């Protein structure tokens, strides 16, 4: 696969440094990652409410708690991905600056 500079994407730009990602693409990826985080936060909040309601009503909340945990894991992964993109953009900014 070829990058924007006419070199393979897997090729490093600096000795041992990972390939550079065009800033525009990085910002687009960051926006997408932030949307995923926001959507996941909404889902987690809704499922926390579902678990609380089921418990308050005296109903079994086991399945709901299990699903909530999975959604919380997804949220953590989305946050980690977003943070990795932010870190990459900061490094690129420092290289360019």
Image: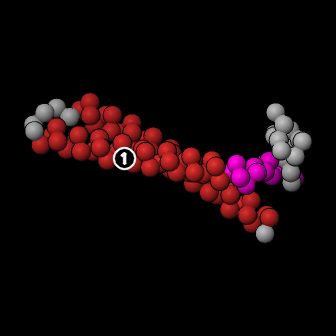
Residue at far left of view: 58
Q: Mark 1: give few (<14), some (14-19) or many (20+) Cα within 10 Å.
A: few
Quick check: 6 left or right of 45?
Answer: right
Q: Position of residue 59 (x, y in %)?
A: 13, 33
Report the residue at 33% width, 34% height from top. 67
Q: Which residue is mark 1?
A: 42
Give the total number of marks visible in the rendering.
Answer: 1
**Helix, strand or loop for disc 1:** helix
Quarter of the figure with residue 4 = top right
Q: Position of residue 85 (x, y in %)?
A: 63, 52
Q: Position of residue 57 (x, y in %)?
A: 10, 39
Quarter of the figure with residue 65 = top left
Q: Does the magenta run of residues contain 21?
A: yes
Q: Position of residue 40 (x, y in %)?
A: 42, 44
Chosen colour scheme: secondary structure
Using the rendered image of the protein, determine whether residue 76 is visible from the camera's viewpoint: no
Using the rendered image of the protein, determine whether residue 33 is visible from the camera's viewpoint: yes
Residue at far right of view: 6
Magenta region: which residues?
15-26
Report the residue at 68% width, 58% height from top. 89
Up-down relation of residue 82 to residue 67 (above or below): below
Report the residue at 74% width, 59% height from top. 92
Magenta part, dominant SS: loop
Quarter of the figure with residue 73 = top left
Q: Does the magenta run of residues contain 29?
A: no
Residue at far bottom of view: 97
Up-down relation of residue 35 to residue 54 (above or below): below
Tell me the quarter of the image containing the C terminus. bottom right
Q: Nearer the viewer, residue 76 or 24?
A: 24
Quick check: 16 left or right of 74?
Answer: right
Quick check: 28 left or right of 18?
Answer: left
Tell me the quarter of the image containing the N terminus. top right
């Amino acid at each position: 696969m070829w990058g924007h500079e006419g070199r393979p994407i897997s090729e490093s730009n600096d000795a041992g440094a990972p390939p550079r990602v065009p800033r525009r693409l990085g910002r687009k990826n960051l926006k997408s990652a932030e949307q995923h985080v926001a959507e996941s936060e909404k889902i987690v909040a809704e499922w926390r409410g579902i678990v609380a309601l089921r418990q308050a009503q005296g109903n079994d909340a086991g399945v709901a708690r299990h699903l909530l945990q999975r959604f919380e894991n997804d949220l953590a992964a989305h946050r980690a991905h977003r943070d990795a993109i932010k870190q990459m953009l900061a490094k690129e900014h420092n290289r360019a600056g």
